Amino acid sequence: MTKLIRGLNLRQAVAINMIDMVGIGPFITIPYIIGAMSGPQCILAWLLGAILSLMDGSVWAELGAKWPEAGGSYAFLQNLFGKEKWGRLLSFLYIWQTTFQAPLVIASGAIGFAQYLTYLIPLDTIQQKIVSGTLIIFITFLLYRKISDIGKISVVLGIIVVGTILWLIVSGLMNLNFQMAFTFNKDAMDFTPAFFFGLGTASTKTVYSFLGYYNVCHLGSEIKAPEKNIPRSIFISIAGITILYLFMQVAISGVIPWQQAKDSPFIVSAFFEQIYGSTAATFATALVLIIAVSSLFAVMLGYSRVPYAAAVDGNYFSVFAKVHPTKNFPNYSLIILASVAFVFSLLFKMKEVITAIIVMRIIIQFIGQSIGLMLLHYKKKDLHLPYRMLFFPIPPIIGIIVWAFIFFSAEWEFIAGAITFIFIGILLFLFLSKQKNKWPFEIL
């Protein structure tokens, strides 16, 4: 059977992570974040997102260096909790969630693209749906090539992403109203329940904008020297994007009053229009659209490897295990995920999709991995780990606390939906295990 090849170097891995992390996310979520915190103190939500990314990134760095395999969390959960018992259940639940969550992520990027396009071209709801669906088809076509070629494309897209944000930052700092950027409301820092609810709601959106720092772990079997390059690419991308996001938020807060910014559907376009006029705003909007395409490119690339890994392992539908005979990538997995995302892009709205994406993943993937890694450290203290995080176990403990805070800050319907989805997955796992006479039924 044709296998994946290690064709991505450190520079390309960092580029793939960064274009995944940025995407349309911050340009769509900034108004929500400002509104949730009611002022420039929303910078706290960005800081919380950065801290969480760094803490959780430490977990991913250890796991990715130890098990550089396609599928990321699928392989991690199996290795952490045992391939025949609890690890089999947790990895199944992860794939079960990914079957729906990954297309939601893809659809959110496509929906955001169509939303921003309306700044340039007036589109009604139906036309926006057509645009978002067409974009998913176009990205699928772009990904239909060798991983080495994809790595080169990613570097070019990464330059556009960073260049656009730097332009925004420099423009904002040159026109910065310091008082507007750093003057908080008199009750902004009153640590009341309302403050923490607002922080939790805003942090859900900032975390959405940081997601992707682990994308290289999904591509573990295609990274050169993974024991070094996976941790490096994770921390380089987190550090770089954190600096860009913090300066970007300050720049916007110092140019557009928060009362206006919180209701702006095209915050970046409004920002450049206020400084330079409509022509610059049009050009900036075009760059945002390119960034959205870049992010979808990276997201679809990474997620297509997840069901592939499960199928190769015999724990998912065998069609996902097929690899293109000459271009060496899981083409069936890519096409199926893209097809589901196409349908989702026609059905859902942006704000609801963002919250669902975050809440659905927290328990099994993020908290589950952190707990599993801590248990691994204490059970096998002499285990060889190519990379060891600093100050263990502080990073995973902080990560678990912050993830739990974000989870319980969500609206009750999203929490109930996530728990219900896990419960249905457990029932499906038990049904399939019974059919195959596997754990927990193999002793009967």
Image (cartoon, rainbow, N blue to C red):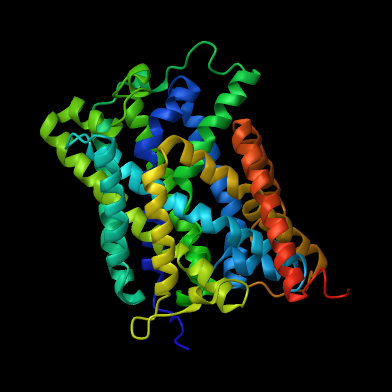
Is 9 in front, or is 269? 269
Which residue is at 43% across, 17% downward?
A: 183
| Residue furthest left in the image | 279
User: Does 317 sit above or below residue 139?
Assistant: below
Q: Position of residue 344 (x, y in %)?
A: 42, 49
Which residue is at 23% across, 33% downward?
A: 269
Q: Position of residue 152 (x, y in %)?
A: 29, 70
Q: Position of residue 42 (x, y in %)?
A: 47, 27
Is 399 in front, or is 352? 352
83 horizontally vs 341: left or right: right
Q: Is residue 410 visible?
A: yes
Which residue is at 28% across, 54% downward?
A: 135
| Residue furthest right in the image | 444
| Residue furthest top in the image | 186
Residue 285 position by quadrant: top left
User: Does 28 sit above or below residue 235?
Assistant: above
Please state, as top left, top right, bottom left or bottom right, where the C terminus lies in the image: bottom right
User: Does 322 sit above or below residue 139?
Assistant: below
For the image, the number of numbered tags is 0
351 horizontally vs 391: left or right: left
Q: Position of residue 252 (x, y in %)?
A: 32, 29
Q: Is residue 174 visible?
A: no
Is 167 in front, or is 85? 85
Which residue is at 41% across, 54% downward?
A: 341
